Amino acid sequence: MKSVQDKINQIAKAETRYVIASLMNKLRDLQLCEDSFQDAIISALQHWPKNGVPNSPRAWLITTAHRRALDFLKRGQNFRSKTELIQYEVQLNADENNLKWNDAIENQVSSMPNPHLPPNSEIDDEQLKLIFMCCHPALNKQAQIALSLKIIGGLCTEEIASAFLTNEATMAQRLVRAKQKIKKASIAFKLPATQDLPSRIDIILSTIYFIYNESYVATNSESLTKVNLAEEAIGLCRNVCHFMPNNAESKGLLALILLQLARIDARVDAKGAFVPLEHQDRNLWNINKISEGKQLIITALTMQQIGKYQLLAAINSCHADAKNFAETDWQQIKLLYDQLYKLEPSPIILLNIIVAQRQTDLADMQLQEQMFTKLSLIEAGKKLATYQPLFAVKADFLIRLGRKAEAKKALDKAISLTHNQIEINYLTEKLNNLCLH
Amino acid sequence: MQYMLLIYADETKTPKPGQDNFPGFMTDYFAFTEKVTKSGQFVAGDGLSPVSTATTVSVRGGKTEIVDGPFAETKEQFGGYYLIEAKDLDEAASVAAEIPTAKYGRIEIRPVMIYNQD
């Protein structure tokens, strides 16, 4: 009994986006779609343990959810939708004209070809429309994230709330607002116009990257969450790659996430302390993730649509290729950051260029001085005044240049800018070591 | 001369369907509308959906930027409006992007309220 329930929950998570997309195609009211889907799940929980899981759970859920939606609409007192309601019912009936609904639908649906299941290409289109809707620019980033996890990832509100370290009521409120906005502002369930595609895809990818980065925050704050946001981000990204095979940046993003995630076990030691790239045990890196990431980035780069995620993935791929820290191809990394800077001129990328160039020859003190001067210029620019890595890097430079007292000050500053306990511990230990020598 | 009367109020204080003061509030509005209609002063009027449904469009360097939320910078003032018919938000946004002021100002899009929609 328990196992059937687990199975139903699993199916519900995986099928959410298919059922919602099918409903959205007809109803345009996301709240109503979700409610109808929920009802279909409740119905599944009642019937499947008795009658067994149908051959096509998706068809069963879609059909049942459409019927529930019709019930909701009939019960509502929405005069405006009367004609739409009749149209909807007529169409449902036409679609299902071979089925006798009032006799147990639960027994019949699974064995019959389902009129609500469109051919594959249409499913692909519906899925894309759903992703574009959840990441519409007229929704704010928080709403895009919450909707993507809920509707496409199939998570429940409580799970999303816990992953974002917020309470369920706040998350529920955020979702309700987003759904209201979609309905009242008529954010359409459709594919964007061709000229809008690049910017719209950008928004989807940035939402996924945000979800992935949030998984770091959640992990580091030592909270025990049931949800693995990194895995959710990978799932969403795979989805986007699948539906937009000609888009190189989505492959780049998937590669980037996989390559970064491959190192996660090596980032923290047995005592829970942060281990920087330099000292990581490379045997702990996940080979499968690395090889998939590398394969993806190679495919993406041959498509000749360079973009920031591909460049970042290529940089991570350089790290993955190096047997140890000393053998890292810093020259290549520097060139990749140079390209990134052309796309997105920001002081953070400039800082990375300096770090990469510095690493090309640590023994060359003239180069070190030169790079340190560049770093000082960034600091003087004040844009990174609260950016912890700037001061951590500055400390590294000063230690190298033998300017201990200044190095300590830079480390103090870096510590004051960090909220993450694991990083604070790491920087503090570095500071203590400096004081000892 | 035509004047556009902009109604500003704290949304949380506006009576909502189901609240005791809602029927009276609506009756007052109907009466006002009837009065100005009979007097020949009425041209067009609508309630707007809440600011949480607002979207702001601007065009910079030829690129259309769409963001969530109302435009609330006090340095710029409300300077005019168009009431348009569009089939969805994307269409409304593309029309908004063609308004000349979008190149230096911003256009806030607010869906007109549909009263029987919950």
Image: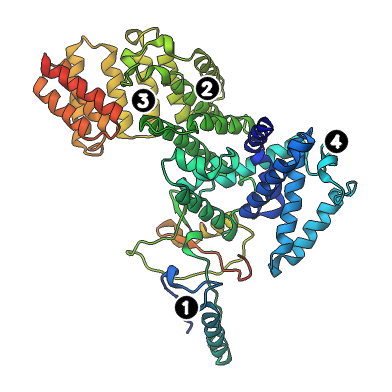
Report the mark closest to the observer, 2 or 4.
4
Whether residue A189 sits left or right of residue A109 in the image: it is left
Question: According to the image, label 4 marks what residue?
Answer: A111
Determine the CA span between mark 3 and mark 2: 16 Å
Marks 2 and 1, how far apart at CA: 55 Å
Residue name at image x 68 percent, y 43 percent: A41
Question: In the structure shown, which secondary structural element does the residue marked by tag 1 occupy?
Answer: loop
- Per the image, label 3 sits on a secondary structure element best described as helix
Label 3 vs 2, first from the N-terminus = 2
* Label 1, label 4: how far apart the Cα atoms are: 62 Å
For this rendering, which residue is in front, A47 or A421? A47
The mark lying in front, picked from 3 and 4, is 4
Chain containing mark 3: A
Few, some or many residues within 10 Å of mark 1 (<14, 14–19, 20+): few
- The answer to whether residue A380 of the structure is visible from this angle is yes
Which of the 4 quarters of the picture holds residue A244? top right
User: Which quadrant of the figure contains the N terminus of chain A?
Assistant: top right
Give the residue number, with chain letter if any, for mark 2.
A301
* Mark 3 vs 4, N-terminal side: 4
Q: Mark 3 points at which residue?
A: A338
Q: Position of residue A254 (x, y in %)?
A: 52, 27
Label 4 CA crowd tier, 10 Å (few <14, some 14–19, many 20+): few
- Chain hosting mark 1: B
Looking at the rendered structure, whether the residues under marks 3 and 2 are on a common chain is answered as: yes
Cα–Cα span, label 2 and label 4: 45 Å
Indicate the secondary structure of the residue bearing disc 4: helix
- Give the image location of residue A393, x and y in percent: 23, 24
**Given contact means CB atoms under 8 Å apart, are the residues at marks 3 and 4 in contact?**
no
Q: In this view, does A73 lie to the left or right of A211?
A: right
Residue A322 vs residue A150: left or right?
left
